[in-house]
Image (tube, rainbow, N blue to C red):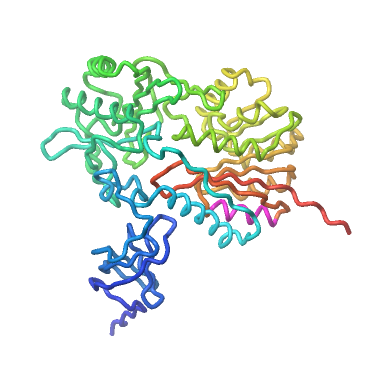
C-alpha cells in the first residue's frame, strides 16, 4: 500500500485567507504567518493586511499571491515602471526608497548576527543615492522573435526565459536604452534572425551596451551565434550614423548552448577596443568583457569607504585579491607603498596593467593571473611577501576557504572585505573571527536601488594577543 502523504500546513492550495505580512525575505518577498506556518508572498510589505490566495504548500512553508490589500503600509509606493510586475529585473519598486535602505541594512545586520554569530559589530545605515533611478551604465539584453516575426529585445519575464519586448528600463542610462532599440531596429531592417534557445539557430543572441559616466563614450557588443554577421558593414554604418556617441562596436561569438552571455572570442568590428571612464580621479580603460561596477556614483562611495578602512599611511604593502581590472587596487595604490593584485581572468589582468600605466601607478602595482587561493600562498612562501593590509572583493559565493586560511596565516594587521552577498560575508567573517580577527564596522552601500542586492565594506583588525 502506498504510504499516505502528510503535511503540517494549516492551509491548502487555492485557499483564500486573510493574514498580516510580518517580515521580508532577503529577496524582498513578504512573509505572512498562519499558525506559525510561513507563506511567502511577492510584493507584500510588513504591517499590511491582505487577502492571500495560497498557490503552493510544502512541509514547512508555502507560497501565496495577494488578491486584495486590506490595510496598506505607509512604505508602499506606486512602481513607476509599466512592466515592473512582469519583469524579473527589479524587486523593490513598490517600496519607498527610504524603506529599501532600511530593508537592506536589516539584511546585512541579520546575516552577520544569525549566520556569522557576531552581535557586537556596528552595521551602519546603507549609503543610498540622491536619485535612485537611471544609474546602470551597462545593459545586457537578450534578443528574441516576436509573434509577427520581428525582433524583440528585453529582460526575461519573472521566473521564465520568455523575453519581454521593452522600449525603456528606468534603472538604465538613457543611452543604453537608445542603443538597444537602435540595434534592434537596424538588425530587423537587415532581416537578422534572433537566436533560438530551443534549436540553437539564429544569429543575434544579446546586445550588450556600456556607457562611460564621465566621458559619455558608448560601447556596443553584438553577441552572435557564430562569426558570421550578415550585412555587418551596413549595420555598423547605420548604428554610428544614428548614434554619434558610439565609439566602439565589438562582436562576441558564443556558439555554446548555455545561459552564459559571452563566448570566449571577442573582436573589434568598428572604432576602439576600449571606452574610458574616471572614478575618483582614477582613469579606467574598459574592454568588452571587463568587470566594471555598473553604478559609478556608488562605486566611488564604496571604494572611498574601503580606502578609509584601509587607513593607508604610505608605507604599507597591500594585497588585493579578486582585483578585476584594478579598480580598488589603483585607489589603494595612491596611498600605499605597493599593491599586489590577483585575478583569475587574463583579460582583466591585461586591463589592470593598462590602467596602472594610464594612471602612472605601474611602478607601485603588480598584477598577476591566477587563483588567489593558489597564488597568494606562493607569493608568501616563495617570495616572503607579507601584507600589512589584505583587501578582498569576491564574487557572490564569497572567499575560497583556502584563501581565508591564507589571510589568517599571513597575519596582516588589517583586512578590508568588500561583499556583494551578506550571507557569504557573514560566513567568512565567522571564519576570520575564529582565526584571530575582529570585525570593527560594516558599511552597506546601495549599488543597486530598486533591487534586493546590497554591497558592503567590512573593516577587520587583528586581535591583540593575550598576555600569559
Residue at image location 34% in from the left, 41% down from the top: 258
- Which image quadrant is residue 171 in? top left
Q: Residue 390: x percent and y percent?
A: 67, 40
Residue at image location 57% in from the left, 37% down from the top: 322
Using the image, determine if residue 123 lies above or below residue 230.
below
- Of residue 137 and residue 269, the one placed in the foreground of this image is 137
Using the image, determine if residue 37 lies above or below residue 195.
below
- In this view, the residue farthest toward the right is 468
- Which image quadrant is residue 21 in? bottom left
Specify start and end residues of the magenta stretch as a single range: 424-434
Residue at image location 40% in from the left, 47% down from the top: 451
Image quadrant for the C terminus? Answer: bottom right
Image quadrant for the N terminus? Answer: bottom left
Q: Residue 110: x percent and y percent?
A: 53, 59
So how many labels did they put on this image? 0
- Which image quadrant is residue 35 in? bottom left
- Of residue 27 and residue 281, the one placed in the foreground of this image is 281
Predominant SS of the magenta segment: helix
Q: Is residue 250 left or right of residue 26?
A: left
Q: Is residue 370 left or right of residue 386?
A: left
Was residue 4 drawn as part of the magenta stretch in this picture? no
Q: Residue 76: x percent and y percent?
A: 35, 55
Was residue 430 drawn as part of the magenta stretch in this picture? yes
Q: Residue 58: x percent and y percent?
A: 34, 71
Q: Is residue 5 left or right of residue 415?
A: left
Amino acid at each position: 500500500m502506498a504510504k499516505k502523504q502528510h503535511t503540517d500546513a494549516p492551509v491548502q492550495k487555492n485557499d483564500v485567507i486573510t493574514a498580516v505580512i510580518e517580515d521580508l525575505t532577503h529577496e524582498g518577498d513578504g512573509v505572512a504567518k498562519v499558525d506559525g506556518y510561513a507563506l511567502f508572498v511577492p510584493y507584500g510589505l510588513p504591517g499590511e493586511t491582505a487577502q492571500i490566495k495560497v498557490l503552493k504548500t510544502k512541509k514547512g512553508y508555502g507560497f501565496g499571491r495577494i488578491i486584495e490589500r486590506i490595510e496598506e503600509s505607509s512604505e508602499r509606493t506606486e512602481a513607476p515602471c509599466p512592466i515592473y510586475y512582469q519583469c524579473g529585473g527589479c524587486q523593490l519598486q513598490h517600496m519607498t526608497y527610504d524603506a529599501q535602505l532600511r530593508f537592506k541594512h536589516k539584511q546585512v545586520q541579520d546575516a552577520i548576527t544569525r549566520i556569522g554569530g557576531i552581535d557586537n559589530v556596528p552595521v551602519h545605515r546603507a549609503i543610498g543615492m540622491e536619485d535612485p533611478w537611471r544609474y546602470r551604465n551597462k545593459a545586457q539584453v537578450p534578443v528574441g522573435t516576436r509573434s509577427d516575426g520581428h525582433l524583440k529585445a528585453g529582460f526575461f519575464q519573472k521566473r521564465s526565459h520568455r523575453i519581454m519586448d521593452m522600449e525603456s528600463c528606468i534603472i538604465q542610462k538613457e543611452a543604453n536604452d537608445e542603443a538597444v532599440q537602435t540595434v534592434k531596429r537596424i538588425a530587423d531592417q537587415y532581416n537578422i534572425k534572433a537566436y533560438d534557445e530551443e534549436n540553437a539557430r539564429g544569429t543575434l543572441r544579446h546586445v550588450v551596451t556600456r556607457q562611460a559616466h564621465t566621458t559619455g563614450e558608448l560601447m556596443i557588443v553584438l553577441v552572435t551565434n557564430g562569426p558570421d554577421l550578415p550585412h555587418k558593414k551596413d549595420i555598423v554604418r547605420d548604428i554610428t550614423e544614428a548614434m554619434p556617441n558610439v565609439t566602439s562596436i565589438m562582436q562576441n561569438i558564443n556558439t555554446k548552448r548555455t545561459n552564459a552571455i559571452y563566448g570566449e572570442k571577442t573582436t573589434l568590428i568598428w572604432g576602439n577596443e576600449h571606452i574610458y571612464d574616471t572614478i575618483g580621479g582614477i582613469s579606467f580603460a574598459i574592454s568588452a568583457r571587463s568587470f566594471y561596477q555598473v553604478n559609478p556614483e556608488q562605486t566611488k562611495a564604496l571604494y572611498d569607504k574601503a580606502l578609509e578602512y584601509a587607513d593607508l599611511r604610505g608605507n604599507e604593502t597591500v594585497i588585493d585579491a579578486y582585483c578585476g581590472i584594478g579598480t580598488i587596487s589603483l585607489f589603494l595604490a595612491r596611498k600605499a607603498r605597493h599593491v599586489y593584485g590577483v585575478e583569475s581572468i587574463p583579460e582583466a589582468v591585461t586591463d589592470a596593467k593598462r590602467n596602472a600605466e594610464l594612471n602612472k601607478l605601474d611602478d607601485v602595482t603588480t598584477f598577476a593571473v591566477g587563483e588567489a587561493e593558489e597564488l597568494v600562498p606562493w607569493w608568501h612562501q616563495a617570495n616572503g611577501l607579507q601584507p600589512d593590509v589584505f583587501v578582498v572583493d569576491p564574487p557572490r559565493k564569497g572567499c575560497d576557504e583556502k584563501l581565508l586560511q591564507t589571510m589568517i596565516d599571513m597575519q596582516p594587521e588589517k583586512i578590508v572585505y568588500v561583499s556583494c552577498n551578506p550571507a557569504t560575508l557573514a560566513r567568512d567573517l565567522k571564519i576570520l573571527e575564529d582565526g584571530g580577527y575582529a570585525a570593527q564596522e560594516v558599511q552597506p552601500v546601495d549599488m543597486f536601488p530598486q533591487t534586493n542586492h546590497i554591497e558592503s565594506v567590512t573593516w577587520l583588525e587583528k586581535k591583540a594577543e593575550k598576555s600569559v
